[in-house]
Amino acid sequence: MAAINEVIDLSVEDGVAVITSNHQPVNALSAIVRDGLTAAFEQAFGDPAVQAIVLTCAGRTFFAGADISEFGKPPKGASLHALFDRIEGADKPVVAAIHGTSLGGGFETALVCHYRIAVPSAKVGLPEVKLGLLPGAGGTQRLPRIVGAAKALEMMTGGAPVGAKAGLAMGLVDELVPEGENLRAAGIAFAKRVLAEKRPLRKIRTMSVAGGSPELFAEFRKANAKAFRGFEAPEAIIQCVEAAATLPFDEGQAAERRLFMGLVQGVQSQAQRYMFFSERAAAKIDGLPEGTAVRPVKKVGIIGAGTMGGGIAMNFLNRGIPVTIVETQQAALDRGVATIRKNYENTAAKGRMTQDDVEKRMGLLTPTLDLNALADVDLVIEAVFENMAIKKELFAKLDAIVKPGAVLASNTSYLDVNEIASATKRPQDVVGMHFFSPANVMKLLEVVRGAKTAPDVLATAMEVGKQIGKVAVVAGVCHGFIGNRMLAQRQAQANALILEGALPWDVDRVAFDFGWPMGPFQMSDLAGLDIGWSKETSKGATIRERLCEQDRRGQKTGAGFYDYDAKRNRSNSALVEKLILDFAAEKGIQRRQIDDQEILERLVYPMINEGAKILSEGIAQRASDIDVVWIYGYGWPVYRGGPMFYADTVGAAKVVAALQKHAPRLGEGFAIAPLLRELAQAGKRFTG
Ligand code: NAD
């Protein structure tokens, strides 16, 4: 083999040139790869001894995609577009031999080749939408020419890859190479067959698009309006496929180029690329000794089979990890187990799980009323009532029961993990594992590092999170940790706004338009207004208490801040409006007109301010961790990149100015975070 450069090799065997990329870890199409490929193809095209070319990759995968670290930077290296034009326009057949995951630019590279062969385990797809982009190297023009407009829309706006077998059925792959067979040799053999049979060069650009009627696009937009709300990339992709269906290839590609440039320079894609890196960065724990080993977790104990305990248990059962779940009352235990079963049965009814899968999972669950049954588990997660005395009593008992070396975790939402740990003689083994509701669905896990939490216990909690498919973020001890501490700021402002002049539906509309799935009052109605409320102690001191006193306790009672019909459709409530106006009058509050801009600034900027404090206090390791918490735990719109990234797009100076303007209304003791002030003065950002 002859090296073209550090990462690209070229060899010729029996008249077939094999061009191999070896750019670890995933053969990203970095400048050095594009340079090498350009030179290698020129050499192969110019060599009269070469009749056909096979393009393949060493290592674990065919080109996995573009090098996203190059996005938004000044261009360098050979142009991918020029290389693609050369390959597709060649007069010698080019065969892509695919293994691993050929995604994005990687799959677009395969699409300019005249033929594609793949091992059955290979996956192909165009997931650029997940980074707020579109497949901008001709992907939007070529994919519909193979699979038709409808399938192409679905694949590119959804971003999910397809397996090689499905790819074969759809025409994305021409032939499967049995697993274990030498892919390079199979590529050479395939190329020779193409030559021997004198097969024509298959240039996708010359094909036409099936099924691209105006009705298809209109229906697709309508059917997906909810899922695509706020995102720019899906609409740009639809426009590209429309162009593919109606324009000659070169004009379609020009449209694709224009739309791609708009996206790549826009805030949404920057935000989504930032989140891609932020999610990976969250797994890194500051100050952890290199090579800290994690404790094995093969058996889990969960205490409390309520809303959270049941959901948490499902995460482990889904991964085949046995769970012992403990309650104090048989009825509560039965109810909890029945809920878990019902969730699985529902999934099975939708065809997303077999009945066998349901039974397998339920078979791994041991319900009990005996805490002693946790003696031999490797990890305990406590999810009982949010009450310090109860939790401390429980941890003291656990200390006496559970084997040494087990990790003792609490799912507390707000409480001091250090105090909980102090109830044991092994505070080094205690950690917070804060899940989000519904715990079997929500991706976020806040791992709360106590003052005495041992490094390997912290690492174990993070690793467990990863194993059960969560995005784990380290938080320090404070009231509400990262997420709920910031949420309290938003809630306080929402409550203040409805007294000062706005109505719940005004606040919720602004929050929804910003991109949250629902506003604070809709969220309260969903969760139930009576969390922590009791009839006996209620003093009618807040709007919420007054609603509860009228048995308007949220969706479950058919009324809360809103009225609900039998199908839980919401409508604004004249009664609630009057209740709010009366309450304000009683408190001597002069109501005024509040515009949407003020609502938005007051919902979001105090959160940013709190985020800055959380960062300065070391509660969060890095600004991007705060953003990960908000994206995965609270439905913050990913295209705005989380509160700290959003602050950077607004500019710290503007945030400070608005907070100063609103300060008299932001509550007693409100203070602008010194870090936020510093950034504003220096014109700096929270995120890199
Ligand atoms: P829940 O009331 O639905 O469930 C608590 C369960 O614990 C009940 O079934 C109760 O019978 C049981 N229990 C109480 N004391 C017990 C004991 N000593 N031994 C065994 N079982 C006992 O409450 P939840 O919403 O699941 O919340 C549980 C914990 O999770 C709380 O600390 C809460 O702050 C936290 N949390 C809740 C949410 C949420 O959205 N609900 C989110 C994150 C964290």
Image: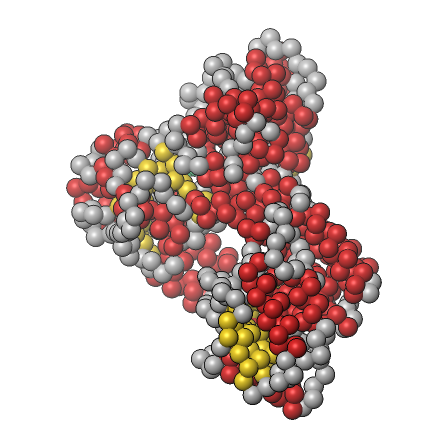
Q: Residue at point 64% right, 65% down? A: 108
View quadrant of ligand 1: top left
Q: Residue at point 73% right, 51% down? A: 259
Left or right, 506 with respect to 545, comes to right
Q: Residue at point 20% right, 36% down? A: 424
Q: Quadrant of residue 426?
A: top left
Q: Position of residue 309 (x, y in %)?
A: 37, 45
Q: Position of residue 495 (x, y in %)?
A: 56, 23
Residue 27 visible in the picture: yes
Left or right, 523 with respect to 180, comes to right
Residue closer to the observer: 329 or 327: 327
Residue closer to the observer: 651 or 195: 195
The count of marks equals 0
Left or right, 265 with respect to 358, comes to right
Q: Position of residue 38 (x, y in %)?
A: 62, 67
Q: Is residue 326 above or below residue 95?
A: above
Residue closer to the observer: 484 or 255: 255
Q: Residue at point 54% right, 25% down? A: 682
Residue 637 visible in the picture: no
Left or right, 250 with respect to 44, comes to right
Q: How is the image coloured?
A: secondary structure
Q: Position of residue 294 (x, y in %)?
A: 28, 51
Q: Quadrant of residue 640?
A: top right
Residue sticking out furthest to the bottom: 196
Residue closer to the observer: 445 or 392: 445
